[in-house]
Image (spheres, helix red, strand yellow):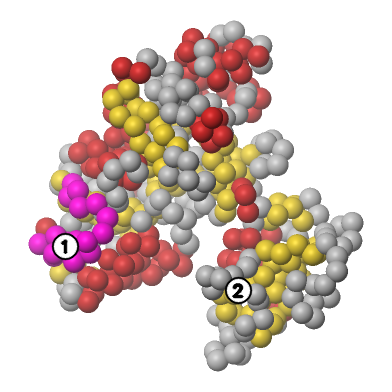
Amino acid sequence: MTAERVPAMFEPDAETMPEEQRAAVQQKRLSGMIDRLLAAGGLQGRRLAEAGLASGADVALADLPRLPMTSKTDLWSHYPFGMLAVPLPEVVTVHGSSGTGGRPTLVAYTRGDLRLWARMCARALAAAGATAGSIVHNAYGYGLFTGGLGIHQGAIELGATVIPVSGGMTSRQVTLIRDLRPDILTCTPSYAIRLGEALAAAGLRPGEGLQLKAGIFGAEPWTDALRARISELLGLRALDIYGLSEVIGPGVASECVVAADGLHVNEDHFLVEAVDPLTGGPVPDGTAGELVFTTVTKEALPLLRYRTGDIAALRRGTCACGRTLVKMSKITGRRDDMLVIRGVNVYPSEVERVLLGEPALAPDYLLVVDERAAQSRLVACCEYKTDGPAPVSSAAELESRLREALGISVAVRLVPAGTVPRTEVGKAVRVARWAGGEPPLPGLS
Ligand SMILES: [Zn+2]
């Protein structure tokens, strides 16, 4: 893409800031945040005081990895407003998520927090090529969930025209897209597929009634294979956006349309670290680790070193779009799914990516952690399609690909379809531990 076709940034000074200048901004904001937490005297302030800190001036940016962490458990145990850093009357709204355990995670916002959030979402929209002349079809759900209202306020901040269609009622969405001809689509990647199929069924295809240029898809992890499918179906550039309500919502990080190879983290407001999920120590850039965010400018609920449980790798350097903001990879897994094999952290999703790259294999597989010896080993039992093409890769070829992708040896066993045990919902069981006795799969040795 040539320079004149690079879309205008929403906040170019902040987004292209040289590294040293940004570090100075981050330092000042981090010190200010520490002071606010100490003054608020809540859980985080007490932890800082216990760590011997009396003032934000005592904390250097390089000290960040030694500061106390916060987690979802902290939010739950201080539900609903126990972690506020401002008096309750300053709170103007709450958002949140239902959470996997059923307990809601509630996050409070001041007026200032809402303004910040709108700017972060405006950055994401501009990075996708949206302008004040854009029509944004926003099919994220509106409500407690941050997706709908986050993108909505961002589009208004940018000066675009936002269609607050929310999720569902697909036939109405098709009508609105046909009549209003939006250039930007925002929704979950799975809904983008559903919508694309409904549009095609209504005779609306790329170049035939569809004018979409870019889509911003988030709120669930998705792959590059899905990116290709959505792009083809809707004739747009499919871009990823990342956020979670605890940090602010969507707009924590987003892909630019120029490179679309990772998400620029708005690190002037959200300091990001990638840490080893077990030790909490930093992992080098380029290595997958758990993302940890520090929200240095948030007012109502500033979080120091919040552990997300999301696994991704960080990458630094200036992007072809001109942004100097650190990039995070797509989310490649969840902390809770991690296996440790001979001291190496392995995410089942990484193994899956290699296995599903083989068209002759069925999507059902079982990862067996063989713990019978002192040194555990990983065995990937993969079903091959009995009615499809013959396996083009031998087990040895798959083993070599897995070694390259994971950095450890994984034994591969190809088994006939139907061998891997299914749960009652028909989904394959992904991981089994074998500590002794009968193997989890007949014939395994
Ligand atoms: Zn970029």
Q: Quadrant of residue 205?
A: bottom left
* Residue behind mark 2: 422
Residue type at mark 2 is Arg
Q: Residue at x 31, y 55 (%)?
A: 187
Q: Is residue 2 above or below residue 244?
A: below
Judge left or right: residue 33 versus residue 288. Answer: left
Disc 1 target residue? 172
Quarter of the figure with the N terminus: bottom left
Q: Residue at x 43, y 21 (%)?
A: 84
Residue 156, percent across and down?
20, 39
Membership of 252 in magenta stretch: no
The magenta stretch is 162-179
Compared across the picture, whether 82 is left or right of 231 comes to right
The quadrant the C terminus occupies is bottom right
Q: Nearer the viewer, mark 1 or mark 2?
A: 2
Looking at this view, is 222 or 38 the one in front? 38
